[in-house]
Structures are given as structure tokens and as C-alpha cells.
């Protein structure tokens, strides 16, 4: 139905294992699937340049180099270019990609439609799509490898919020916590810089009597109108 896997296929017994253990989506497809990265394709739209095979790749960017033709269309392209390994993908519903109206908005408005009028990510995924879960296997996978990776994903989903709003709030809280951590780190660094710049013993002489000499930094701050520590 999808035609998005062309080339090397995963072993059938591993495909049956994933489907039997983790079930199917509403369309009868496996919820998780094992993919050979170079075989995974996706639809991409835009303006394509077709080159004569005799023209070397390094020469195609030169002003004198001219492609055989330029065409605007949808093409199948590699989803994971440059990777040669086994990976696991999880099916996600169409709602994860927004509504068709949002999908077909211009890129400038958060959609996928390019100025040439073509959706850069192809048609809206009405049947959902498969997304990488992050597991990479540069060896022949076994049952233990697959179940360990998928079970970890399932546990993280069960521990997290069950609604889109809850997941959005969780991401917001995580982002705020990260920003607070950065602010504290910056404050600590600023304090260290100020301490290093201040004269030793606050400018007071090590020996002698009395004296009300204040550090030059304090005097400079008062001259420019700073009456308290900026932090």
C-alpha cells in the first residue's frame, strides 16, 4: 500500500515477531517494523536537476555546469541518506502531522507547500506514517535486540502524558527547566568574573592602621550611578 520500502527487506521471522508481539495499527499494518535504512524511501517535492552521468558531482556546482533538465515534481528519495544499518520504525497516526489544512499551508505559515505550489513532503499521510524510534543496529538483529529497543519505547510512552496537550505541557516544562539551569550557570559565571576582577582584600591594605579606601570597581560603579550589585 505504501511502496516506501524498496530493496532489501527485513527477515520474515523478525517481521512476524514484531507484529505478533506489538500488534497492528487500524489499517492492519504492524505498529513497529524493522527497516534496512537504504531501502526506506519517502516522497519529496520540489525542483529537481537531472545531470549527465559524465559530469562529476564536484563539478555540478560550478557556474559553467548546466544540468540536462530541471523539473518540478514529486520523487522518491532516501529517508535516511548515508546510513547503512537496521533500524526500527513506529507507526504514528495522521493526527500527529496536524490537519490536511495545516499540511497544505505555505511553508512560511508552518505548512509544507513551497512557493512553486508543491508540497515538499508529498501528500498528506491520511493513513499515518512510520517514524524512527532511534535504535540503530549495524549488525544482524536478533529477537533480544528488537524487543529491548521497542519495550524501552513502550515504557517511556506509558510513563508520559497520554494526551497531546499533556505532552505539549511536559515539553514546555522541560524547556523552562533547561532555561533556568542555563540562567543559573550564567549567574555563577558572572559572579566568578566579578570576583576575579575585584582587587584582593577589597582593596584594603594588608598592613597598617585604619583607612577607608574602597576598591576602584566600587568607586567606578558609583560614578556611573550603580548603587547595588547588578546580580
Image (spheres, rainbow, N blue to C red):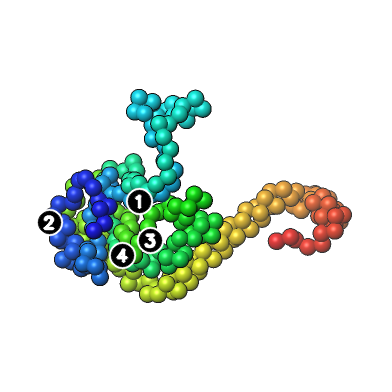
The residue sitting at 48% across, 71% down in the picture is 169
Q: Which of marks 3 and 2 is nearer the N terminus?
A: 2
- Asked if 70 appears above or below 126 in the picture, the reply is above
| Mark whose residue sits in front, 4 or 2 | 4
71 versus 11 height, above or below? above
Secondary structure at badge 4 equals loop
Q: Is mark 3 on a helix, strand or loop?
A: loop
Q: Circle 3 is placed at which residue position?
A: 124
Quote the CA–CA distance across marks 1 and 2.
Answer: 28 Å
Residue 149 location, quadrant: bottom left
Q: Position of residue 105 (x, y in %)?
A: 49, 60
User: Viewer-proximal residue, 39 or 132?
Assistant: 39
Q: Is residue 28 above or below residue 59?
A: below
The residue at which mark 4 appears reads as 127
Q: Tell me whether the residue at label 3 lies in contact with that at label 2, contact meaning CB atoms closer than 8 angstroms.
A: no
SS at mark 2? Answer: helix
Kindly state the secondary structure of the residue where label 1 is placed: strand
Q: How far apart are marks 4 and 1 (CA)?
A: 15 Å
Q: Are marks 4 and 1 in contact (CB under 8 Å)?
A: no
The quadrant holding residue 131 is bottom left
Residue 66 appears left or right of 212: left
Dot in front, 3 or 2: 3
Q: Position of residue 198 (x, y in %)?
A: 74, 50
Percent across and percent down for residue 85 are 26, 45
Q: Position of residue 230 (x, y in %)?
A: 74, 60
> Closer to the N terminus: mark 1 or mark 2?
2
Q: Residues within 10 Å of mark 1 (few under 14, many from 20)?
A: some
- Residue on which the image places disc 1: 43
The residue carrying mark 2 is 13
Which one is earlier in the sequence, the residue at label 1 or at label 3? 1
Amino acid at each position: 500500500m505504501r511502496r516506501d520500502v524498496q530493496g532489501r527487506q527485513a527477515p520474515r521471522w523478525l517481521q512476524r515477531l514484531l507484529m505478533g508481539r506489538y500488534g497492528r495499527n487500524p489499517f492492519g499494518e504492524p505498529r513497529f517494523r524493522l527497516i534496512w535504512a537504504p531501502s526506506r524511501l519517502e516522497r519529496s517535492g520540489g525542483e529537481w536537476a537531472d545531470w549527465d552521468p559524465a559530469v562529476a558531482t564536484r563539478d555540478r556546482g560550478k557556474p559553467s555546469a548546466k544540468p540536462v533538465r530541471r523539473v518540478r515534481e514529486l520523487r522518491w528519495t532516501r529517508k535516511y541518506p548515508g546510513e547503512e544499518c537496521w533500524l526500527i520504525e513506529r507507526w504514528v497516526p495522521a493526527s500527529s502531522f496536524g490537519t490536511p489544512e495545516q499540511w497544505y499551508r505555505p511553508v512560511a505559515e508552518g505548512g509544507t507547500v513551497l512557493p512553486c505550489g508543491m508540497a515538499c513532503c508529498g501528500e498528506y499521510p491520511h493513513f499515518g506514517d512510520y517514524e524512527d524510534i532511534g535504535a540503530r543496529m549495524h549488525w544482524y538483529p536478533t529477537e533480544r535486540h528488537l524487543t529491548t529497543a521497542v519495550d524501552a519505547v513502550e515504557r517511556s510512552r506509558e510513563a508520559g502524558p497520554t494526551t497531546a496537550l499533556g505532552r505539549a505541557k511536559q515539553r514546555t516544562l522541560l524547556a523552562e527547566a533547561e532555561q533556568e539551569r542555563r540562567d543559573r550557570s550564567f549567574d555563577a559565571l558572572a559572579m566568578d568574573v566579578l570576583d576575579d576582577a575585584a582587587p584582593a582584600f577589597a582593596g584594603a591594605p594588608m598592613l597598617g592602621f585604619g583607612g577607608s579606601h574602597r576598591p576602584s570597581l566600587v568607586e567606578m560603579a558609583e560614578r556611573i550611578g550603580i548603587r547595588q550589585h547588578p546580580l
